[in-house]
Image (spheres, rainbow, N blue to C red):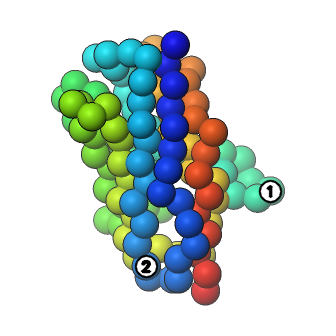
């Protein structure tokens, strides 16, 4: 059973940085795509970034390009999201997700990121 556990959220001032981590277990993850989503209060969950497990191909939402960086450590089975130049609008519950088919079928519980102005 695939399990995803996020960590690293917290409170940071505008312009600050945070690094989120997602510990993955229960699978080899070969052929998977790993991603980060976020959901702000009163808003729908939105895609932030993704990375393919095998080739390390990355994608970013326009709102985070140039500020966020996703990476994965195959040996440790970890996916990280380095978030720099944080803005108040980045405040949200951040989720780690994984898919092997077209839709994300595995989700973590989320970690809260709050950016104060």
Cα distance in 3D space between marks 2 and 1:
24 Å
Q: N-terminal of the two: label 2 or label 1? A: 2
Q: Secondary structure at mark 1?
A: loop
At horizontal 51% and vertical 44% (from top left) the residue drawn is 6
Q: Is residue 97 above or below residue 91?
A: above
At horizontal 76% and vertical 58% (from top left) the residue drawn is 41
Quarter residue 85 falls in: bottom left
Q: Position of residue 28 (x, y in %)?
A: 32, 16
Q: Is residue 30 above or below residue 112?
A: above
Q: Secondary structure at mark 2?
A: loop
Q: Residues within 10 Å of mark 1 (few under 14, many from 20)?
A: few
Check residue 80 in the rendering and tell me which mark sits there, or answer none.
none
Q: Position of residue 15 (x, y in %)?
A: 44, 82
* Front residue (pair 44, 71): 71
Q: Position of residue 62 (x, y in %)?
A: 43, 57
Where's the C terminus, which quadrant? bottom right
Q: Are marks 2 and 1 in contact (CB under 8 Å)?
A: no
* Front residue (pair 113, 7): 7
* Front residue (pair 12, 44): 12
Quarter residue 22 falls in: top left
At horizontal 47% and vertical 27% (from top left) the residue drawn is 98
- Mark 2 vs mark 1: in front: 2
Q: Is residue 98 above or below residue 18?
A: above
At horizontal 59% and vertical 52% (from top left) the residue drawn is 111
Check residue 42 in the rendering and tell me which mark sits there, or answer none.
1
Residue 90 seen from this side: no
């Amino acid at each position: 059973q695939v399990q995803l556990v996020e960590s690293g959220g917290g409170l940071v001032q505008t312009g600050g940085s945070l690094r989120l981590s997602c510990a993955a277990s229960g699978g080899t993850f070969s052929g998977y795509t790993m991603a980060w989503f976020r959901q702000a209060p009163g808003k729908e969950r939105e895609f932030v970034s993704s990375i393919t497990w095998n080739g390390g191909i990355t994608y970013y939402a326009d709102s985070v390009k140039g500020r966020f960086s996703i990476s994965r450590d195959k040996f440790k089975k970890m996916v990280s999201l380095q978030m720099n130049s944080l803005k108040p609008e980045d405040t949200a519950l951040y989720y780690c997700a994984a898919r092997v088919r077209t839709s994300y079928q595995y989700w973590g519980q989320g970690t809260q990121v709050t950016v104060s102005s």
